[in-house]
Amino acid sequence: MQRRFHAPVVLPADPACSLLRDAVVDVDEAGRITHVGPVSGAPETSAPVTRLSGLLLPGLVNAHAHSPMTLLRGMGGDLPLLRWLTEIIWPAEAKLKPADIRTGMMLGSVEMLRHGVTTSAEMYFEGEQLADAVLTTGGRVILGPPIMELPGMDWRAMLKSVERWIDTDGLRFGPGERIEVGYGPHSAYMLNEEALRATAESAAERGALVQIHVAEAALEDVKQREEHGSVPALLEKVGMLRGRTLAAHAIHLSDEDIALFAARGVGMAHCPGSNAKLASGIARVTELRKAGVAIGLGTDGPASNDDIDLWEELQLSAMFARLATGDSTVLTAGDAFLLGTRGGADALGRTDIGALEPGRWADLVHVDLDDPAFAAGLDVPDEQLLSNLVWAAGSRRVRDVWVAGDQVVGDGESLRVDRAKVQAEVAETSARLRS
């Protein structure tokens, strides 16, 4: 059904980060946007009008997550990255059943949707379970099923599993193309050159996205840096930077690495919250932006963050950039907002999400104004209103969310899933993992 959304302020997430006053967003029967602009210039329509009281903005894009790890939240939370992985996380994950992973993803998806995050790029096992969970909640997901080499794991079998899935179902499927399937080679330190090259070739053949951890911790890939100069140089050697590639974290980069990312069109998922919690470092976001690298924001996993509220990443991205440069103007509220919306879509190579523009999916978020953050009202300069949204309000006033035009959150709660029931299932599973 065609619909019109009418709001006092619409933030389309255009490159200029404009605010449209007294504006509408029109959506067609398929769930795509057909028009965005002030109501005074809107085309005539007989479509039902949904009148909103606050701000209407595009769904946020979480460019890097491991959301089923809601099951592991808080476990080993004060350990450094490599000890956290080897001593706590990987042993616990070895106990997970496919149904557990679906439950963890269900809660993660509901949590994100309630915060206005409509799309997440996930790297986790049992991709079919993740897809089913997200189809149930009504969200949108870009899957990167892991490819890695550990005891009991065969990277060749994992690669072939992804190939079969894409060859059978296609890259995108589900209502509103809610599911995209790609590749998730874990990292250069967990795969040999043969595995990295084979994954790159398979993904390029299918036009699929590759999600990979790059240069996250200073001590994780010493061998690769010694042999190849840097992790990006190794990935370039095996051809992984020549297709659609998202580098997650990408903290420890040289000037040459940044130039290589820019030349190859590599997207970067900046995860400031997780990077800080694990003391991994501060990514060179200012230099990456100047070089023209597409940057989105990611939460990483809810066991390393420990929430998956992307609004916090908006704030942290700006704070860390300012601290790193000593310049309080280097990354503005508008810049941060774009990193969490349009920037995430660009980093993932998606031109159909992340902004309110004709042809894109109607992934919409309504933020109401009943909050001290908006006590000054709407009759303030655009810059001040945007600042109030990013710095003061965050996710707490997200009231309604639509994905491909379908409402999935109403009055702050999931309309598709019984959250209390899912939380109880997560509690039961978490107890079993600790036993």
Image: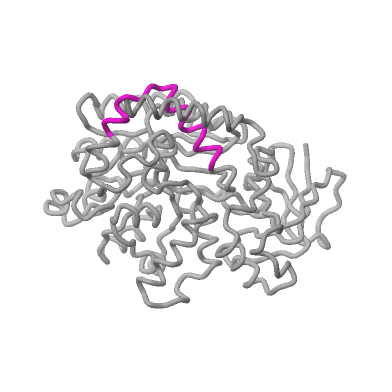
Q: How is the image coloured?
A: one colour
Q: Quadrant of residue 139?
A: top right
Relative image position of residue 82 (x, y in whole percent): 23, 45
In the image, residue 291 above or below residue 428: below
The quadrant of the picture occupied by the C terminus is top left
Q: Determine if residue 113 is in view.
A: yes
Q: Is residue 114 above or below residue 102?
A: below
Give the x, y percent position of residue 118.
Answer: 57, 44
Q: Is residue 411 magenta?
A: no
> Considering depth in this image, is 292 or 66 the residue closer to the camera?
66
Q: Residue at x 75, y 49 (%)?
A: 26
Q: Which residues are magenta?
A: 90-111
x and y percentages locating residue 9 in the rendered image: 72, 61
Residue 267 seen by the camera: no
Q: Position of residue 268 (x, y in %)?
A: 39, 54
* Drawn side of residue 47 relative to residue 391, left or right: right
